[in-house]
Image (cartoon, rainbow, N blue to C red):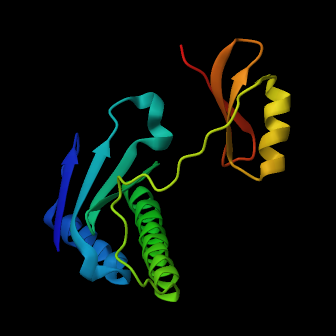
Amino acid sequence: MEIIVHGRHAEVSNDERSRVIDRVEHATRVFEQAVDSVDVELFEEPNPRRADQRHRVEMTASVSGRVVRVESAADTRETALDAAIDRFTRRMREFKERLIDRGRRHESVTVEEDPPESDEIVRIKQFVMKPMTIEEASLQMDMLGHSFFFFHNASTDLQSVLYRRRDGRLGLIEPS
């Protein structure tokens, strides 16, 4: 694993560099074999109006071909580094748990045939689209138990997609 520590608008001493490397190595022990490289950038904001967040730390890691990035800001460099390391450790644990859960789901399913190609269309649905309001589309989507609903919007006379956002509210996609 390669760990790069550098500063922008700030000098990084050798002692500080070795301390950061030790802390990053400790944080990556959760998932060490999958971490390719970690880039730690220490910023010092020259703007005096931002004194409460003068020091920033950005950590970018390449983990199993994916990018994990965290950022933190505080009034001291040590506090910003602590917060960034905590967030980085938490993200690494979440990522590892997701991979483990995905593996468990796939282990429980026994597949007799070859898996289909990713671009292969396996089902085509056709239906008659009657014009409806957004409220009717929302009701229809909830009755079907879907997270999205494609419909003909009666108020705009356009095809639209109504979808349920992660926060539980609704979103609407319309062509321009």
- Report the side of 14 relative to 65 (left or right): left
Horizontal arrangement in the rendering, residue 166 relative to residue 11 (left or right): right
Instruction: Name the residue located 49 percent from the left edge and 71 percent from the top edge.
Output: 94
Query: Can you give x and y, in whole percent of width and height, for residue 47 in the image?
Result: 38, 29
Indicate the position of residue 164 as horizontal and vertical percent values. 70, 43
Q: Is residue 123 left or right of residue 3?
A: right
Q: Quadrant of residue 19?
A: bottom left
Q: Quadrant of the N terminus?
A: bottom left
The residue lying toward the viewer, choosing from 4 and 90, is 90
- Counting labels gives 0
Task: Looking at the picture, tell me which residue is in the foreground, 165 or 39.
Answer: 165
User: Is 11 placed above or below 157 here?
Assistant: below
Regarding residue 135, the answer to whether it shows in the image is yes
Above/below status of 88 relative to 73: below
Give me the residue at 37% from left, 72% from top. Answer: 115
Q: Residue at x 51, y 84 (%)?
A: 109
Instruction: Give the residue drawn at x 38%, y 79%.
Output: 113
Position of 50 with respect to 114 (left or right) is right
The image position of residue 166, as x and y in percent, is 66, 49
> In the image shown, does 138 or 171 lie closer to the viewer?
138
- How far from the left and from the top, in percent, is residue 36? 20, 70
Residue 12 is at least partly visible in this image: no
